[in-house]
Image (cartoon, rainbow, N blue to C red):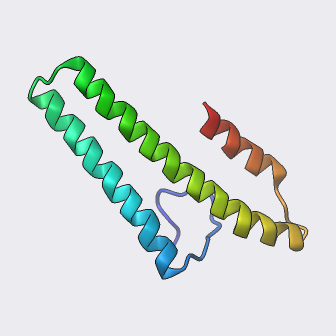
Amino acid sequence: MPCEHCLSQKKTERSVDEKKKLINRLSRIEGQIRGIRQMVENDAYCVDILTQSAAAKSAFSAFNKELLRRHMESCVVRDIKNDEADIDELMDIIGKLMK
């Protein structure tokens, strides 16, 4: 069954440990976002909200860096070995992450 959120039909097999680590990171980020929402609902001071927002952004950047590292170590290496390397795809995602 295709991923409803995915742009590509490609898949990446991940170990149980890798999935657990990525999901744990996302769960922490999700908690941070819920906390920021609660701060807005409770009329917290703008600087306090911005501080928490910056922390969430940093956590999400760390998640992206880890996922990109794994992508390069696994998917990109595999595709190069199979003469299926898509450098444009890699450069596009790096460009999106650098914005």
User: Along the line of sight, which residue is nearer the eye, 85 or 33?
Assistant: 33
Up/down of 32 relative to 69, above or below: above
| Count of numbered marks | 0
Q: Residue at x 31, y 25 (%)?
A: 50
User: Along the line of sight, which residue is nearer the eye, 87 or 5?
Assistant: 87
The answer to whether residue 7 is seen in the rendering is no
Most extreme residue toward the bottom is 16
Q: Residue at x 42, y 72 (%)?
A: 20
Q: Residue at x 47, y 60 (%)?
A: 4
User: Along the line of sight, which residue is nearer the eye, 5 or 30?
Assistant: 30
Residue 10 found in image quarter = bottom right
The answer to whether residue 69 is seen in the rendering is yes
Up/down of 18 relative to 32, above or below: below
Q: Residue at x 55, y 50 (%)?
A: 64
Q: For the C terminus, which image quadrant?
A: top right
Where residue 8 appears, as percent x and y from the top left, is 63, 59
Where residue 77 appears, as percent x and y from the top left, is 80, 68
| Left or right placement of residue 93 versus residue 60 in this view | right
| Left or right placement of residue 62 versus residue 96 in this view | left
Most extreme residue toward the top is 46
Up/down of 40 relative to 84, above or below: above
Most extreme residue toward the left is 42
Residue 98 found in image quarter = top right
Where residue 5 appears, as percent x and y from the top left, is 48, 56
Residue 39 found in image quarter = top left
Where residue 31 appears, as percent x and y from the top left, is 26, 50
